[in-house]
Image (tube, grey):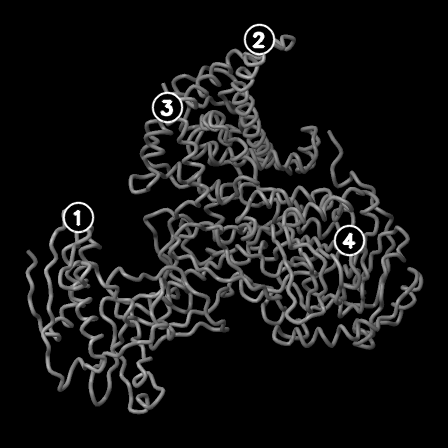
Amino acid sequence: MPVTVALPEDVVRRLLPTLSFVVQEVEKEGGDANDYRVLVRALACSLVDHANSDDDQTLAGSSPIKPLPMTRPTHSPDVGYNSPVLHDLHEDNTLPRPCQHVHRIVHDPDEGPVLKRARMDDAPGDDEGMGPEPEIIEVSEEDTQEGSPGDKGEGRIEDNLDIVNDEEEGREEDMEGADFTDAGDMGDDEEEEEDGDEEMEGLADSGDLEDTVNVEDDHEEEMEDSSDAGDAGDSDSDSDYNPGAAVAHLLLPGQCKRKGHKKQEKSSRRKRVGNAKRRGRGKKGRPNWTNSTTLPPPTTNSLQLLARLSTVSSQQEFVQALHQITAQLMKPSLDSVEWDDMSLGAIGKRCQVLEKSEGLCDYKLMLSYLQLMLTCDGRYKEARWKGKKGPSVEQCAREAGTTTSNFQTWRSQGTRLLYLASAASPFLLLLFAATQMRVDICRSKSSSMEDISGFAWALRCSEPKHPYHKLVQDLILPQLQCLLDLAPNAPWFKLTFWDDVNHCWSRRHFSDVVSIRDILDKAEVNFFYLPPPSEIWTCLTPAPMPDPDSSYKMAPVHTIKTGFRVPTNRCPFNTEEALEWTAVKRETALKAVPVSSLSELEEKLDGFYDSKGKKNDPDSYILIDTGICEGQTLFIQDADSQLVAIMIPNMADCIPHVQHSIVPQLQTTWPGEFVRNHSDRPNYSYFCWHGSYYNRYAERGYDAPESASPYFTLKEGQTTVHIQRRAPGHSKEFLQDIGEADLLAKLFQDVMSFVNVRALLPGIYKELTVFVDHLPLNDHSPAYPFSGFVINVGVATDGHRDGFDKLACVVIPFGKWTGGELCLYEAGFVWRLKPWDILIFPSGRITHFNLHFTGLRGSLVMHSDKGGDAWAQGEELGYNGWSHAVAR
């Protein structure tokens, strides 16, 4: 039988926060707080029901104290103790929902603390909550006038200041690394506007989901005046959190939690609450660093790969496949296949034999990729020891009898396998073959660099506190140990490498676990050393084709040197003025004077600029139709022989299939996006997709201690180590759908290979390749020598400069349209490009915009992130200040 007691209302109100605090402390210690939680619910529900009966009842002052009927919960045999039945509360024996009747405490100068009913639309959502005991707001007499919170019941309880500070600082902590994930102003001459900063979501770091800030991506053009192109990595990149808008409601503990963050009003500076201190800055504004005891969590895809690998022990067919691969390595069974017999029995036998041999081929291919990577690494180390320069990628590709692009793909796949083998053992390749994971591991369309690195440290550093520990210890390790005992002394269980100690080439068997791990750890992968292995691993102890750059014939080059000087100043307007400025300049650009030949263009440019390299008439433009080039590549230089613009007109003739294939392929990939459109209308927007590597928002460790580990070092004010933010990472769109990214890269591969930057701009080519040649895990950029590419659909940009672009960008429009000319403001050029014409220009130094267009128009833009210089520039490889922790 339930026991009913009557408690005075003021006692209930004093008791409720105390019991709430007890519940939280008990649960924090891992105890059972069910009894306390049920009592808290009963107290709060009766309090709310009592308040609903009389909205004007005050909590203090002259109001009489009314006893509240309270009921002790009893165990229900049908429902169980975790769902207690509260009698005398509701007739149906169910708990009332306090969130349905939200009341707020407001302190009135005359009446004291008063409980007021809130509007129903003020009820909290899933992202709102309160601490164990809310503050009471002091309300002045003016605030109790008509329409004030005190009178209308629309006041609010401010969160406890500590809670507000934690929320504020948590958001700031999340933004310190600033997610990569969005491309931002990608350097496309015709690229997207960014109303909102970039996000590295899914980023890349899919680790601490509670720390992830979800920000809506309204793109805004990066203006040279509003975003300094120098140190882009230090900019705050998210909408500001407004703690003044946070409301604490009278809720039961555990009823409403803060999960996620709604989009807040944008501001140039984050608002502060009271005297809340901003964490993350030590003395003199420099951050303090502390050690973390835990690794950052792997990405979701990393864990999926780990789970799939573990099936080699949980499914019998994979166990059989593993032993079959090992047996076939000694005696391949393909010789016994009879191809002349077409009976069902013979065909079935062939299918069985070939299916079994599939794993064998995968293993040998993966081992070849891994050995290729080790051989390249050894060649470079041997050359350095001899005081020589190591072979270039092109030389290695020619020696391997393949193209540079194909060789880079092989090396990238070998690097992935090497990194994973160093995390566990080269025998891991056999497990990949048995589980048919070769494509998932090796191909970028299936797993990103972030996924592979997360997979590697999840394998190597697995500890009992990790949820995936049992997969590694109980399912994967036993199979590796079994292979260690079974593996014969055969060449397909050995690796050849350069011995830095003895300065000679050497060979080791996989069973030499410690030596092999040390060798693989020292290979140059342009990414962080893996942390030391966990104790569970101690049990593993033993008894020429033509280069694509020259595949297409480039048109002869016609060079024009002008008196123009590429500007070094900032953009002539700020972001807020861009729309109005562009509207005015479009009108003047429409009056551009056309030229009919290259000779006439040279005549017009003679005297077009003054002695300072600026236009004599700021509103003058020259209209250049690419038809005047007569099949020649037009190269316009400034007074210092620097690049102003290069126009290549003959790609469609060299690669005719692109004119008919890419547009329908994009329309199939993005249904409803690539359609006829017109840009001259209010609130016009366009679609853009980024497939790039970015380093502009990386968390740099220049001020971290010299021995700091990027895996275990926390910056002051942070609660999670965001390892992926400390190295270059992929754009958000790339990570959201890797298969789509791989498809788009293949669609435009011929186009991107056609642009021969090396022949036209050798100096720029050399500078651009430094970053892309040192991408994490030796990843390969399909837009080489650029670090990424952007696809714009229906593009018509307002005036902007791409301050984050390095040196130059490549613009290639495609589709069928009228209008849409590309204007270079300071140079005074209006380019009327045909589909698949190529324009190269310094997008970070010349202001550019599009005229309005009508029709079907898209563009491919290749660019490099200037922020990559912090990772690798010239002869200096800074690795974002983590060079001491990078394997090279």
**Alpha carbon distance from label 2 to label 4:** 55 Å
- Helix, strand or loop under label 3: helix
Q: Are marks 1 and 4 in contact (CB under 8 Å)?
A: no
Task: Of the two numbered discs 3 and 4 on the same chain, state the one appearing first in sequence.
Answer: 3
Which residue: 71% across, 49% down? 765
In front here: 358 or 568? 358
Task: Of the two numbered discs 2 and 4 on the same chain, state the one appearing first in sequence.
Answer: 2
**Alpha carbon distance from label 3 to label 4:** 56 Å
Q: Are marks 3 and 4 in contact (CB under 8 Å)?
A: no
Q: Nearer the viewer, mark 1 or mark 2?
A: 1
**Alpha carbon distance from label 1 to label 2:** 65 Å
Q: Amino acid at mark 1?
A: Gly
Please give the residue where the numbered disc 4 appears in the rendered image.
Answer: 838
Please give the residue where the numbered disc 2 appears in the rendered image.
Answer: 336
Q: Amino acid at mark 4?
A: Ile
Please give the residue where the numbered disc 1 appears in the rendered image.
Answer: 80
- Helix, strand or loop under label 1: loop
Which residue: 16% across, 61% down? 22
Q: Residue 337 at x, y = what percent? A: 59, 10
Q: Residue 77 at x, y = what percent? A: 14, 47
